[in-house]
Amino acid sequence: MNFNLSEEQLMIQQAARDFAQTELLPGVIERDNQQRFPHEQVKKMGQLGFLGMMVDPKYGGAGMDSISYVLAIEEIAKVDASAAVVMSVNNSLVCAGMEKFCNEEQKLKYLQPLASGEVIGAFALSEPEAGSDATSQQTTAVDMGDYYLLNGTKNWITNGGNATYYIVIAQTDPEKKHKGINAFIVEKGWEGFAIGPKEDKLGIRGSDTHSLLFTDVKVPKENRIGEDGFGFNFAMAVLNGGRIGIASQALGIASGAYELSLKYAQVRKAFKTEIINHQAIAFKLADMATSIMAARMLCYKAAVEKDEGKDISEIGAMAKLYASQVAMDVSIEAVQIHGGYGYVKEYHVERMMRDAKITQIYEGTSEIQKIVISRSIVKNSK
Ligand code: CAA
Ligand code: FAD
């Protein structure tokens, strides 16, 4: 594995860093306070190619590799984890899944505007009674000949209020269990499709999370993704890549909190010296830097293996499991290093601590990542 970043990758990293500093940082505290979606910033992210980073330019994407994607999400999440999840969902769960599994017509109609950032998308798998246990889908899609009739409720959907196109997973044939599940592209505004109120969250408050309600929504047959019964395998394949995006978001939260803490410890004085001269603080920073580096290496390895076309279910789960723990641990320590100043909004680290928690929950909780990893290591040991 080559650890040197190419010139192009370094350029993308710098572009994301500059964008985060100039466009995201100025309003990030207000957006968090007011639960305000970063509309203008997301539009600009689209113009910079950050919303369809790995998609072929012929479908409106930027045609970059997965390392570039990790680098860009890390830089965005260092400053604004809410903007990073908008980016991760659109890139990994919506665009990547469409590019790999949709037919040409679907790609031209839906992927093109999504990858170019003209509109954003959402991915709706979770339900009130089916989160970790994702095969227990209660949303139904009854085959009516030319169309499917969609009924049910999806919960916790990121970009739920602001998306134009939604990938919706539903059960068509319960007797076949997960082999009876399908994935559909659903458009905002279709009759019978309603969006529930915005959730009032602990963290990532700038991103919008909604339930989606479907009552007799007619979904044309041509909007099904893949063969009949492919929906669950589609969702799992998409989530394997998605977990790299969330791992990178977690990495960004951790490195943002660490960088602020390092700067603070070099200027804040207590007992007539900068606090970094107290070994208890220096050692915290040493632990933070070490765990962040380890998380970064897992993200890079997962990204490289994805581009090599390898099965990334295990390494993607490892990256997410580890990086999300690092985000939590590092952001808690960042608040500690800042003392009382860490507890108020102005210094950013309290927000980072609140934002970190979700990375251990969505796209599969840490317990679910351990299920994925343990099943994989058992399978590979035979
Ligand atoms: N990669 C590929 N295929 C997988 C897979 C993976 N990681 N995990 C399971 N599968 C496949 C299995 O191979 C099997 O397919 P076949 O029958 O064709 O072989 C099928 O899925 C069912 O697998 P299991 O029998 O293992 O199913 P299970 O019910 O025991 O457990 C699970 C599956 C891993 C727990 C799965 O339900 C899961 O991942 N749950 C978590 C759901 C999740 O991550 N939700 C995220 C929602 S999106 C989101 O959260 C976005 C956001 O916040 C921003
Ligand atoms: P549950 O599945 O009820 O789990 C509760 C607890 O039990 C967890 O600690 C879990 O780890 C544990 N548990 C469950 N089963 C097991 C087991 N077998 N072994 C050990 N422990 C277990 N979903 C989408 O589809 N699209 C989105 O865009 C999206 N965005 C989200 C944004 C936010 C802000 C949030 C909060 C959630 C989002 N989700 C989304 C949903 C998210 O993926 C689920 O919340 C998550 O998968 C967990 O499901 P659950 O909340 O139903 O918890």
Image: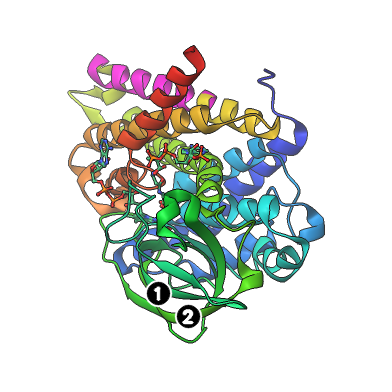
Quadrant containing the N terminus is: top right
| Circle 1 SS class | strand
Magenta includes 288? yes
As displayed, is residue 115 above or below residue 310? below
Residue 155: which quarter of the image?
bottom left
As displayed, is residue 177 above or below residue 145? above
| Circle 2 SS class | strand
- Contact? badges 2 and 1 (CB < 8 Å): yes
Q: CA distance from mark 2 to mark 1?
A: 7 Å
> Where's residue 299, x and y in %?
53, 30
Amino acid carrying label 1: it is Asn
Instruction: Determine if residue 250 is in view.
Output: yes
Most foreground residue, 211 or 115: 211
Question: Ligand 1 appears in which quadrant?
Answer: top left
Instruction: Determine if residue 264 is in view.
Output: no
Nearer-N-terminus badge (2/1) = 1
Secondary structure mostly taken by the magenta-highlighted segment of the chain? helix
Magenta includes 357? no
Q: In the image, is the residue at mark 1 within 8 Å of ligand 2 by its beta carbon?
A: no
Amino acid carrying label 2: it is Val
Task: Name the residue at 67% across, 68% down.
Answer: 110
Near mark 2 (Cα within 10 A), the count class, few <14, some 14-19 or many ≥20, is many
Which residue is label 2 attached to? Answer: 217
Q: In the image, is the residue at mark 2 within 8 Å of ligand 2 by its beta carbon?
A: no
Which residue is label 1 attached to? Answer: 151
Most foreground residue, 5 or 26: 5
> Where's residue 305, x and y in %?
64, 28
Task: Tell me the number on the disc at residue 75.
Answer: none
Q: Over which residues does the magenta segment extend?
A: 279-297
> Where's residue 342, x and y in %?
24, 43
Near mark 1 (Cα within 10 A), the count class, few <14, some 14-19 or many ≥20, is many
